[in-house]
Amino acid sequence: TLHDLWWSFLDALIPLGLPIIIFGGILGGVFTPTEAAAVAVFYAGVVGLFVYRSIKWSDLPRIFIDSAVMTANVCFLLAVAAVVAWMLAVAQVPARVLELMQTLSAGPTAFLVLTALLFIVLGAVLEGLPAVIILLPTFLPVVKQLNIDIIHFSIVVVAATGIGLFLPPIGVGLFIACSIANVRMDRVIGPMMPYVAFLCLGLFLVILFPWITLVLPRLFGL
């Protein structure tokens, strides 16, 4: 009924404050993404302690310990990824990979497909940010030479890296999700593969039809 809908809406107002704080604060320039995460955690803690009372004061030590362990695990993965990324950069691997891709690809579409495959693999092996920082400066001259829209190319790279972050062996996103759900990674990999397949299909459609990613930027004159 409308009455139930209204009260459900009122009950959801407080939890809806969380994404408003995160996105509103970041897009409004109030704080950085890292600061937004800290503010969001503080907001969720206050709501859990004083509004819904789903968190007890006695639960806080366990919550802090679990958070510290999870953060340490993720930071260790990021540190290893940073070392590997540095080694790849020193060995000039990105330039050699780019030469190979130019040899194999015959046009913009083939180049974007190879780029997507590369960033999916790197997202699964490295953390996404080092892969982007290392490869993008090397790739941009070729992107301009092939007349590929920079916005379209960037969206393909971000989407491909995001898919890789949830793939084994050390996808950071997959690792965090398994840690939060307290399940082993080998139990998750099989059931999630159909979703990964559809994500890859969506990425392939984005590559084939650039207007999917460019319609909004063009609408706003970007």
Image (spheres, grey):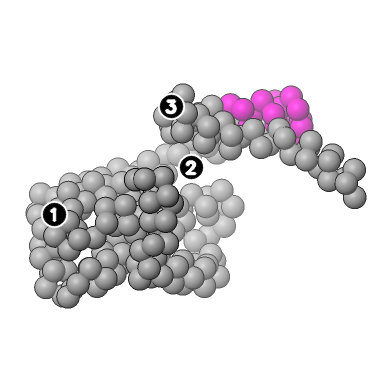
The disc labelled 3 sits on which kind of residue?
Answer: Gly
Above or below residue 7? Residue 53 is above
Q: Residues within 10 Å of mark 1 (few under 14, many from 20)?
A: few
Q: Secondary structure at mark 3?
A: loop
| Residue under numbered circle 2 | 70
Q: Position of residue 127 (x, y in %)?
A: 33, 50
**Disc 2 to disc 3, how far (Cα)?**
29 Å
Indicate left or right for 120 with 65 as reference.
Answer: left
Query: In the image shown, does 27 or 57 lie closer to the viewer?
Result: 27
Q: Position of residue 70 (x, y in %)?
A: 48, 42
Q: Residue at x 61, y 27 (%)?
A: 43
Q: Residues within 10 Å of mark 3 (few under 14, many from 20)?
A: few
**Disc 2 to disc 1, how far (Cα)?**
39 Å
| Residue under numbered circle 3 | 29
Q: Secondary structure at mark 2?
A: helix
The disc labelled 2 sits on which kind of residue?
Answer: Met
Q: Residue at x 16, y 69 (%)?
A: 101
Q: Is 165 contained in the magenta span?
A: no
The image quarter containing residue 94 is: bottom left
Q: In the rendered structure, which disc, 3 or 1, sits on the residue that comes first in sequence?
A: 3
Q: Quadrant of the C terminus?
A: top left
Q: Secondary structure at mark 1?
A: helix
Q: Position of residue 3 (x, y in %)?
A: 90, 43
Q: In the rendered structure, which disc, 2 or 1, sits on the residue that comes first in sequence?
A: 2
Q: Position of residue 221 (x, y in %)?
A: 36, 45
| Residue under numbered circle 1 | 141
Q: Is 53 contained in the magenta span?
A: yes
The residues colored magenta run: 41-58
